[in-house]
């Protein structure tokens, strides 16, 4: 899915503080049961691999869901080229809430599935597509529940939710000379050609693998480099809400993920909330990029922690 470099050195940039001293505004209550259902619905389509019927069916479901929650929806369809020359149908789905507000924040996650379980311990499974319950569907499920809440109680700022496609079609650098920037193709496309020319947001937050029961979210190094003020805001908010066992206020890995391209190309300071443990051999869970990334790994308590934290960040942004 992504490339992790646990030892990369990223020194945080100095930025103006934008953290909240206290949560003064009551945020809506995040419903983890609802988020779980949205994850399960995606998984029911099967692996959402580009150029498949499951991709089209799930894209229609995500589009209809955002419309049902009264978002202004843009469906950005394009063709992108994979590292091996394959032309991929890319479908980015954008939902704008409070679209007339000038001050905006961006929330995003990828919704596609990896075409190959290349990390599976059984070589016979390594050409099998990944179900991607945690690595993809979990972030989307949390954001769909947030969208449902936004429809019921409009915040003072604008919120844009983007489901990025063709994130997980990348390849490791030792496998192809075309590996560089082979990940996050849908995000790269949007960053170069946003749905609104000149689109700006105060900051962005990426959700990636946010549904597992044993999830820990360390401070990802690119996030600290480009947007330490957002990391501080989110991790401090989580701590105040009692979710410190998930949001570990310590240095994690430097991970090439969607937020890197939002920072570097779109120049929107963005962070990554991602399950990663620097003390593990691979950093990620043992079912990452295997056929075992299924609903069995999804835990409603983790969904509640992530979703509740984000809702408090959103509704306390003035």
Image (spheres, grey):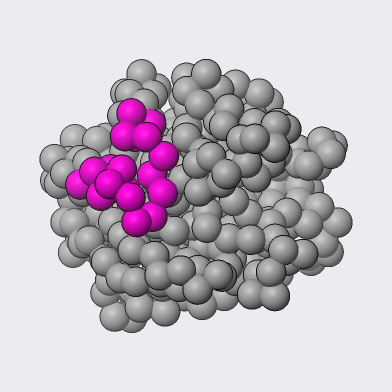
In the rendered image, the vertical position of residue 35 relative to residue 260, given as above or below? above
Q: Which residues are magenta?
A: 42-60
Q: Is residue 217 magenta?
A: no
Considering every residue shown, the one lying at the far front of the view is 124
Residue at the image point whose x is 63% and y is 61% from the top: 171
Image quadrant in which you'd find residue 289: top right
At x 16%, y 56%, the residue is 72
Q: Is residue 98 left or right of residue 261?
A: left
- The residue lying at 64 percent from left, 75 percent from top is 178
Number of callouts in the render?
Answer: 0
Of the pair 32 and 164, the residue shown nearer to us: 164
17 and 276: which one is in front? 276
**The quarter of the displayed image where residue 209 is located:** top right
Occupied quadrant, residue 33: top left
Evaluate whether residue 263 shows in this view. no
Residue at x 27% of width, y 66% of height: 77
Name the spot of residue 288 as percent of width and height, x first.
63, 37
Which part of the image, by quadrant, shows the C terminus? bottom left
Image coords of residue 200 (percent x, y): 37, 72
């Amino acid at each position: 899915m992504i490339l992790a470099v646990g030892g990369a050195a990223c020194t945080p940039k100095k930025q103006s503080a934008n953290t909240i001293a206290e949560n003064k505004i009551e945020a809506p209550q995040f419903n983890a049961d609802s988020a779980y259902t949205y994850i399960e619905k995606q998984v029911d389509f099967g692996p959402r691999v580009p150029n498949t019927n499951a991709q089209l069916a799930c894209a229609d479901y995500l589009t209809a869901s955002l419309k049902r929650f009264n978002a202004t929806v843009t469906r950005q369809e394009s063709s992108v080229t994979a590292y091996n020359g394959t032309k991929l149908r890319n479908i980015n789905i954008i939902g704008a809430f409070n679209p007339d507000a000038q001050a905006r924040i961006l929330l995003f996650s990828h919704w596609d599935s990896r075409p190959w379980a290349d990390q599976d311990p059984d070589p016979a499974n390594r050409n099998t597509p990944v179900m991607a319950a945690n690595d993809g569907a979990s972030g989307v499920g949390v954001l769909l529940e947030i969208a449902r809440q936004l429809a019921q109680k409009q915040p003072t700022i604008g919120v844009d939710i983007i489901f990025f496609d063709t994130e997980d079609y990348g390849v490791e650098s030792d496998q192809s000379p075309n590996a560089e920037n082979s990940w996050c193709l849908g995000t790269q496309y949007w960053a170069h050609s946003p749905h609104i020319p000149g689109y700006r947001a105060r900051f962005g937050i990426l959700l990636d693998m946010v549904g597992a029961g044993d999830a820990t979210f360390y401070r990802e190094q690119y996030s600290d480099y480009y947007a330490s003020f957002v990391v501080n805001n989110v991790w401090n908010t989580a701590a105040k809400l009692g979710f410190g066992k998930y949001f570990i206020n310590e240095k994690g890995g430097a991970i090439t993920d969607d937020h890197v391209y939002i920072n570097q190309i779109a120049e929107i300071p963005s962070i990554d909330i991602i399950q990663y443990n620097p003390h593990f051999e691979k950093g990620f869970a043992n079912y990452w990029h295997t056929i075992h990334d299924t609903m069995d790994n999804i835990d409603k308590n983790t969904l509640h922690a992530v979703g509740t934290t984000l809702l408090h960040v959103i509704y306390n942004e003035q």
